[in-house]
Image (spheres, rainbow, N blue to C red):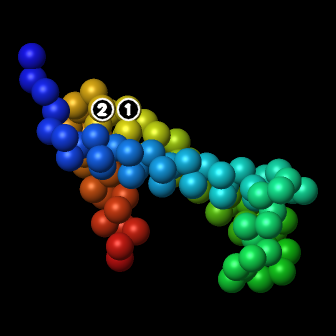
Amino acid sequence: MKTRPKGVLLIAIIVFIAALLALIVGITIFVPGTPLDMIWTLKNSFPTGFKSSSTGIIFGYFIVILGLILISAVWGLLKGMKWAWWVVLIVFLINGI
């Protein structure tokens, strides 16, 4: 039985945290009036009314989908699937650019 390298677990934890943050941000766009709305008022670089605009809704869907992709990549990393490594690598490369 092959064992996964210890670094993969660390990367999976980091990606899981990023996925949770993406899901939280995406959900705060769709659910107004939650305590998480404070996130949008503390450092809001988006224009007023962004959350209710069509661009904001598209952004929310994109962020939620990204979070779900990252959650599946974490599962793949923990199972030792090669595709998961590529997904994580591509997402973080795009983020870096």
Question: Callout 2: helix, strand or loop?
Answer: helix
- Residue 19: where, in percent of width, then height? 50, 49
Name the side, left or right, on which 39 lies relative to 74. right
**Residue 53 visible in image:** yes
Q: Is residue 62 above or below residue 68?
A: below
State the mark number for residue 75.
1
State the mark number for residue 78.
2
Residue in the picture at 77% in, 58% down:
36
- Residue 92: where, in percent of width, then height? 35, 62
Q: Is residue 40 above or below residue 47?
A: above
Question: Callout 1: helix, strand or loop?
Answer: helix
**Residue 61 visible in image:** no
Q: Quadrant of the N terminus?
A: top left
Residue in the picture at 81% in, 63% down:
37
Structural crowding at the residue carrying mark 1, measured as other residues with C-alpha within 10 Å and reported as few (<14), some (14–19) or many (≥20): some
Name the side, left or right, on which 71 lies relative to 46. left
Residue in the picture at 37% in, 58% down:
91
Pick the front one: 60 or 45: 45
Instruction: Tell me whether circle 1 and circle 2 mark residues in contact (CB < 8 Å).
Output: yes
Circle 2: residue type: Leu
Q: Is residue 56 above or below residue 25?
A: below
Structural crowding at the residue carrying mark 2, measured as other residues with C-alpha within 10 Å and reported as few (<14), some (14–19) or many (≥20): some
Q: Which image quadrant is residue 95 in?
A: bottom left
- Residue 75: where, in percent of width, then height? 37, 32
Q: Which image quadrant is residue 78 in?
A: top left
Q: Quadrant of the C terminus?
A: bottom left
